[in-house]
Image: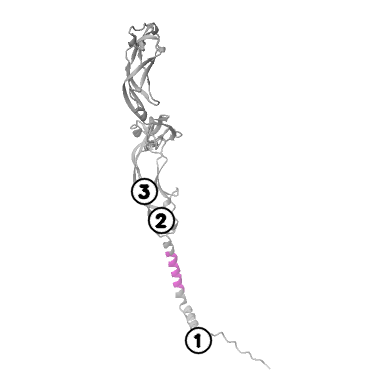
Amino acid sequence: MALRLKPAKLFQPEDPSLASGMAWARVWLTQNLQLKLLSLFLALTIWGFVAPQRRGETSEIKFFSPLVLKNIPPNVAITSDPAQSINVLVRIPRAMANNINPSRFQVNLDLSNQMVGAFDYPLTGKNVVYNNQPLPEGLEVLQITPNLIPLTLEEMVEKELPIKPQLAGDVKSGYEILFVKITPSSAKLMGPRSVLQKLNRVYTKPLDVQDLSSTVGMNVSLNLVDHVRPADPNENYFQAEIKVGLLTSRLQIQDIPVIFEHAEYIYQSSAQNVNVFVVGPIDEVKKITNKNVYAIVDMRKYPPGDHRGLSPKVMLPEGVRVLEQWPIVDLFVLPRKIKDIPPPKNKGHASKNPSRNGK
């Protein structure tokens, strides 16, 4: 008995709408196939042309960049005041825009071949660098403002100047600064000729003396003007000694009595009183009068003879000293001892110290 095979049925979607959609797609893809392929080719060609053009679009950025002076010749100083920053306009490919940091740009001036004098230095795109290197390919400098930098270069010379102290603050009440000593007392400096010619001294930086009541020492540096520096780079500090003492006052005292002590010989003096001009702590000086101060001549130092130009020693309180004394005293000592003088006849009016009147 022969078997009959039924022909297999192709897959047909149960949803009639799906079947009709697939049929439409098949018709759309096969209908005008050559025209559709040509359209696709043209679209790809146009896209391939436009895409590189978009990748080549540029942006412009404007920023301030520092001006850096490089390779300044030795023994030359820049005495002008050039601009500190330069306004730069740069064109950048848009593809690089996110990788460019404006703070890494700088404008360099190479002064290695410049002579002393005044001139205007022109700026171009070659002066602009990025990360201290020439600009990356694709970057273009469009504008630099200012594009001329006035510069003045001067020869550096040496000059030795005395050092003067500069003080800040007040010492403790009742005290004063007696002197300030700087060691060494002078400094050898280097600077532009036009600057050093105007200087006849150099000052220290302020020395703090606030509430000082005793002598102190400290290191101090110099307060130098622009473009001036120590000739020796190692001589940046000096030693300062500040002498502090009690506040003093001055006083003139007249008619101070002179006492001739230990007299063995008869003598004659040109003055019995002296005058002095003294200085000392204000509290001590206030106490001094010619009633509580006297001057002494030690006669043991003067043998018989003529002694001129003596200054009797004035006995003063501690800390008080004589600035000036007058008159000088001339002393004539006779070769006759005081004990050889006969006593006076009128004993009721005897002199207690006949040696002092020179009789």
Residue at x-position 36% and y-position 19%: 295
Magenta-drawn stretch contains 225: no
Which mark sits nearer the N-terminus, 1 or 3?
Answer: 1
Screen quadrant of the N terminus = bottom right
Q: Would residue 33 be seen by someone viewing this image from the given angle?
A: yes
Q: Mark 2 points at which residue?
A: 92
Labelled pair 2, 3 in contact (Cβ < 8 Å): no
Which mark sits nearer the N-terminus, 2 or 3?
Answer: 3
Task: Kindly report which numbered mark, 2 or 3, lies closer to the viewer in this rendering.
Answer: 3
Q: Which amino acid does label 1 sit on?
A: Pro
User: Percent from the top left, x then y, of residue 183?
Assistant: 43, 30
Q: Name the residue under label 1.
A: 16
Which mark sits nearer the N-terminus, 1 or 2?
Answer: 1
Closer to the camera, 25 or 191?
Answer: 191
Which segment is the magenta one? 37-50
Around disc 2, counting alpha carbons within 10 Å, would you say few (fewer than 14), some (14 to 19), or many (20 or more)? many
Q: Quote the CA–CA distance across marks 1 and 2.
A: 60 Å
Q: Quote the CA–CA distance across marks 1 and 3.
A: 76 Å
Q: Is label 3 in a helix, a strand or a loop?
A: strand
Closer to the camera, 15 or 83?
Answer: 83
Q: Would residue 332 be seen by someone viewing this image from the given angle?
A: no
Q: Name the residue under label 3.
A: 86
User: Percent from the top left, x then y, of residue 353?
Assistant: 36, 12
Q: Is residue 127 above or below residue 308?
A: below
> Hey, which quadrant is residue 42 in on the image?
bottom left
